[in-house]
Amino acid sequence: MSDKNLVMSGSNLERVLKAGHFAVTCECGPPKGADLDALHTKINLVKGCVDAANVTDNQTAVVRMSSIGASAILVRNGLEPVMQMVTRDRNRIAAQSDLFGAYALGIRNMLCLTGDHQSFGNHPMAKNVFDLDSIQLLDVVRTIRDQGLLNNGEPVEGGIQMFLGAAANPFADPFEFRVIRLAKKIRAGADFIQTQCIYDMDRFRAFMKMACDMGLDKECFILAGLTPLKSAGMAAYMNRNVAGITIPEAIIQRIRGVPRGQQAEEGIKLLLDQIQEVREIPGIAGVHIMAIEWEERVREIAERAGLLPRPQI
Amino acid sequence: MIVADPKPFGQVKSYVENFEKILIVGCGTCTTVCLSGGKAEVQMLASGLRIAFGKEGRSKTILEDNIQRQCDEEFVSPVLARVTDEKIDAVVTLACGVGVNFLADRLGKVPVFPGVDTTFYGASVEPGLWAEMCAGCGECMTAHTGGICPIARCSKHLLNGPCGGSENGKCEVDPSKIACVWQLIYDRLKALGRLEELKNLLPAKDWRKASDGGVRQTIREHLYKLK
């Protein structure tokens, strides 16, 4: 990553983190089409509650408005985007070209991902690309940013200063490799990390201990990923069907233990407890709240967690 | 070996509907081993076509042949001669796609149709089970991965370790069938005492030696110049 004390990109998220504040990000998933009103609604729901909002790139391989296009609309509306970019759908030619376009549109944060396999999406018959993996994409963008060179070694016209992020899943296997992979992502250029949603706090603490023992928290900003559960049904579904996510039985029972009409509120309370828990874990620099299609609760969550107002730097 | 699956019978039948004298040719190498294009499969397809056309009251001549390899002139030329001599209208080959192409390039006005769907380069890992092992990428990098190929065996062709979808040694794309190759690589390197390898950052691969560089050829000079 770049110097942890030097603000490089003009990104608000970078300024907040480097000033030592506990950062808050959320997700702002683009619509399944060109529905600008839907996007504006989401923007208005989270604006002012977070330091930046992730704009997903055809997440779960379901076709949506492009991450670059939607991110540019966020910029225009005063909400800072973290533009996600997956390597599933673009080779290094497209990735670099899209990076320049995004930067020219005022996007200053980028999250480099491989992306979900297309078999999970609505076009499972599509051909995938995977010319690069997420670590190689970080490396390609970092080389452009820090050395001004394209992947082929040719010089870039005009510099870019992107604040670079990556994802980490402490809950997938092999567990011992997860921290090695995190270290590789940092070495490849990640300035910040957003984790997969955390439910198994013990395993996350063990992961963070390994990361801190390797000094990785000193080399990048780690944001803990959290997803509020709307119901016991959602918890059980995610536990069963989403690879790399394990929801401890105690959590499912906690939500199930209240009447159906109050399960959403219990989910929010659980999330508030989780926010407090991760704040106390050494090496955590912020939270990434993935309230999937529940953006209307983000303001309330940030408020009740004592995360408002967001710092203006 | 090259693995292939038999095409649906109806599809093959539809290819040859309008021909009278049809030759079905098996291949004695890969498709024989993976039980999709050997002598037995040629016989089965031929009988099936005879019965199916017979039921429709159509009498066609369905001939059978089997050669050792359909990717070599030496083995293919007798078939070419037979097609001419016996005035065959159409050929169905049960070789892999290589055989289809090799025959198509040599059969002049006689059409050739595929009788199998060629799938991958694989190995027989259990009786009756074949699995993909190589992607023919042109530059083998398994020296870094304990001899196990992530390009062929990772659903996302990742070169720097498993994605977030690796759980209990399985790939999220189909946990019932697909092993997470990065779990296999991790276990193998651990057994070899070479886990350090995994810390290396493998840079973006040069795909020019794969099919992305255009159609490929290989020349062995010492043999080629004899021409």
Image (cartoon, coloured by chain):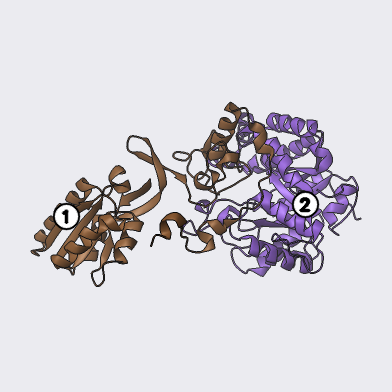
User: Which residue is located at x 57 percent, y 38 percent?
Assistant: B182
| Amino acid tagged 1 | Glu
Where residue B98 sits, quadrant-wise, is bottom left
Q: Which quadrant holds the N terminus of chain B?
A: top left
* Residue A109 place in picture, x, y as percent: 77, 57
Q: Is residue B2 shown above or below B127?
A: below
User: Which residue is located at x 79 percent, y 38 percent?
Assistant: A216
Left/right placement of residue B62 relative to residue A175 reads left
User: Which residue is located at x 21 percent, y 47 percent?
Assistant: B39
Alpha carbon separation for disc pair 2 and 1: 74 Å
User: A101 or B124, which is in the foreground?
Assistant: B124
Check disc 2: other Cα within 10 Å, few if <14, some if 14-19, many if 20+.
some
Closer mark to the observer between disc 2 and disc 1 = 1
For label 1, the residue is B64
Q: Is residue A215 shown above or below B152?
A: above
Q: Is residue A177 shown above or below B88?
A: above
Q: Which chain is brown?
A: B
For label 2, the residue is A299
